[in-house]
Amino acid sequence: MNKKHILEKVYDPNPVEEKWSKFWIDEGLFIPQVPSSKKKFSMVLPPPNVTGILHIGHALCFTLPDIIVRWRRMQGFNTLWLPGTDHASIAVHNVIEQSLAEKGLTREKIGREEFMKVAWDWKDKYGGMIIHQLKKLGTSLDWTRERFTLDEGFSKAVRHVFIELYKEGLIYRDYYLVNRCPHCGTVLSDIEIEHRERKAKLYYIKYPLLDSDESIAVATTRPETMLGDTAVAVHPDDKRYSKFKKKRVLLPLVNREIPVITDERVEQEFGTGAVKVTPAHDPVDFELGKRHNLEQVIVIDGSGRMTEAAGEEFKGLDRFECREKVIAKLEEMGLLAKTEDYEHAVGHCYRCKTIIEPHLSWQWFVRVKPLAEEAIKVVEEGKIKFIPSNWAKTYFEWMYNIHDWCISRQLWWGHRIPAWYCQDCEHIVVSDEAPAKCEKCPSSKLVQDEDVLDTWFSSALWPFVTMGWPEKTDDLKTFYPTDLMSTGFDIIFFWVARMIMMGLKFAKDIPFRHVFINGLVRDFKRRKMSKSEGNIIDPLEMIEKYGTDALRFTLAALAIPGMDLSLAEERMAGYQAFANKIWNASRFVLMNIQGEELCLKEEELTLADRWIRSRLVWIIEELQEALENYKFYDAANKIYHFIWGEFCDWYIELVKPSLKQENRTSEAVLVDTLDQILRLLHPFMPFITEEIWQHMPSSGKSLAVASFPKARKNLIDREAEREMRFLQEAIVGIRTIRAENRIPPKKKVDLFVRVKDERKVGKKAEAEIIRHTKEYIQTLAKIRQVEILDHFPRQKKLLKGIAGSWEIAIPIEKGVFDLDQEKQRLEKELSKIILDIEKIETRLKNTNFLKRAPNEVIKEAKEKLRDLQGKKTKLEESLKHILSLM
């Protein structure tokens, strides 16, 4: 036996994974050819945050597309999977500012220049962590093309896009009410807000009418904003307030006179039907204020603290502290009419979960509607397909109701807005480089905008800028548009829609053809994973414990399109056992290889050889179809059952007699089948398959670039499949009878088979198949001798049964089966079950139990009773049979 073919006795994933991960990268196996005559397949990696750490969602999002990429590469496609990371403005700010706070510092104290140095140092120190972890996951990315959204080329492209959109009037600056996170210190776009139901209070506050003893009561959940009210509004058709129209009220606590106005947008059913109007702190009030030309009084600043405009008593207070003080003051003055419990949706920052604050300020916006029209069209026409298709509906709902996109962020880490303000004439200069002087006046006093662009603005350019745009590079010509984008449903709006809009606008084509939406990873109880629940599964820990291949295969096997994954560690342990099964089976195959040259003669093929070759054709076809349709679960389950159930449990056992007889044809089929299996499994479990394949005869440079199996339809043998199915049913039946009668597994017994000659399986009579497959029956069912009879011998005591379509009998021999002992065992088991049945029946007749016990407990008791009654019936039948033999 060649030493090349020797596998270690036990599979240890760690050194194997480290070895092949390095080998693939060092050998440049994931680098595509440019130019190339081959058909291409390309993808860009959804860029993880540069300071991120691999979590289970990442593991899913990166494993599934890697399966597709590896499969396409093996199919002969010129394959590019391009990696990179995102600068993630808010996430990095949160991390660095937390670090600064521990030292008693803030970003304002150290200044922008020093903060940027700290941020770049942080990126250099921790930015490689996620890259290392991606490699550990076995992702077949081309690391020579790695990009970063803040690298020089990317920054240049971002400025170019901003300038072009500005010139076309699609980017503009406006004084507008936006969402601001007081904790992160920046504005957020509408889709970066998470709305959560919260229990709150609805406060009814009296606003006294001028020159009258009457007052109007308004209802609000945010009494602190009343300090910035500039009107009270009622519906024009609300007769309750007819006499108050065009009158004025005195704003409590501030003593400012404000008008009573009418507007059709007022909801008469809410509260009292009269509402306070705060144009600077509420989106609806902002629009209402513009229509009625109301003053905008800012009483809460960007950090969530009250301004001077809130009055001497309240300035500097946190907004929620101010709320308590306002309520206390109103109560003291007798102006708080009543308070009610109230539940409503409140906006939170998607990053830090702080309650957002509507904030009036100058911001930059993208006029999105003109860009959205073409992006809607390409999905409607099927040029871009969502998988599952129902996600297209979600996409359309958002696109048809799209709002302008606020793209400026009050942060420092990111793409600084390329706009300069003239300090003399206030003209805005938008330029790729810092202008020497103003375009409108001779002034050289120009100051750049302090804000940076929303991270999603640069991410929207990811599919084409990573390939060198705006230059007309070979990569862009070869690989754009890409073929697949695999991502989560939660960023269809944030990212997918914007990539489509920007790709069509600037690269003049769709960014990808298919969008595969994966589900969330939940725990085995289908709960969302969270620290508070203590149910987080760390993929790196799972890799250390079970190996990368087991983790990857688990995620694939659970990935049903359109559904969340219910993940349990036990599944990974199960697929680790699968990896060990493959290793042991491969070790057996390799130990039985007689030489490097394999010799296959068609006339020497056994039934088992013909059967496994035929089954392999079907599996190849089914696997190809499943992967074409992104049915990862289907592909994984098919290859799993074929390897474990058909190859390991059946074919390897069936081929052992042939190997003992040195049948080189069976040896060749065995080796070829294993080779095909390793190729089929490689996209799912790349490490173990590569390690085994390298020990195979005539292996090449790497399984990663070996050809994927093609279905050889000429090898389909339906006759062999029918005969083998007939044989398998019989062997399973024999094993069952042995187990039920407690015949020791290794003890060989004789077998009588009663079969009618005229019955056929395909073209052959059943008796003929049995005669030709005696050796298989003897090997797999531990049978000493098989006799085909017309009638069972009457003089012998027999254990009779049905095995498949056969009537079989096993003679009772001394040392194999003790009738007295079996009778005693059955009687003992039957007595115990009868006792258990009586206990449960007594409980179920007890009215107190039925009244007090939860429905689940009662249901469980009834199910257990049914189960025990079924066992009782079987035991009684077995006992009856034993008594008949005595």
Image (cartoon, grey):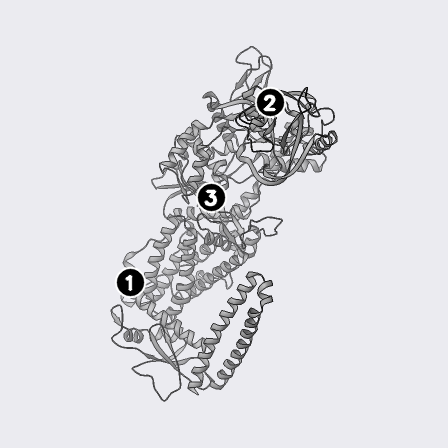
Instruction: Report which residue position mark 2 lands on.
Output: 243
Residue sitting farthest toward the top: 442
- How many marks do you count on the picture? 3
Q: Position of residue 641 (x, y in %)?
A: 42, 60
The disc labelled 2 sits on which kind of residue? Lys
Rounded to the nearest angstrom, the CA distance separating label 3 from label 2 is: 73 Å
Q: Helix, strand, or loop for circle 3? A: loop
Instruction: Report which residue position mark 3 lands on.
Output: 141
Q: Earlier in the sequence, mark 2 or mark 1?
A: 2
Quadrant in which the C terminus is drawn:
bottom left
Quadrant in which the N terminus is drawn:
bottom left
11 sits left or right of 91 in the view:
left
Q: Helix, strand, or loop for circle 2? A: helix
Q: Earlier in the sequence, mark 3 or mark 1?
A: 3
**259 relative to 336, above or below:** above
The residue located at (30%, 76%) in the rendering is 771
Q: Quadrant of residue 774?
A: bottom left
Instruction: Report which residue position mark 1 lands on.
Output: 717
Circle nearer the viewer, 3 or 1 = 1
152 sits left or right of 305 in the view:
left
Q: Helix, strand, or loop for circle 1? A: loop
Q: Position of residue 17 (x, y in %)?
A: 51, 53
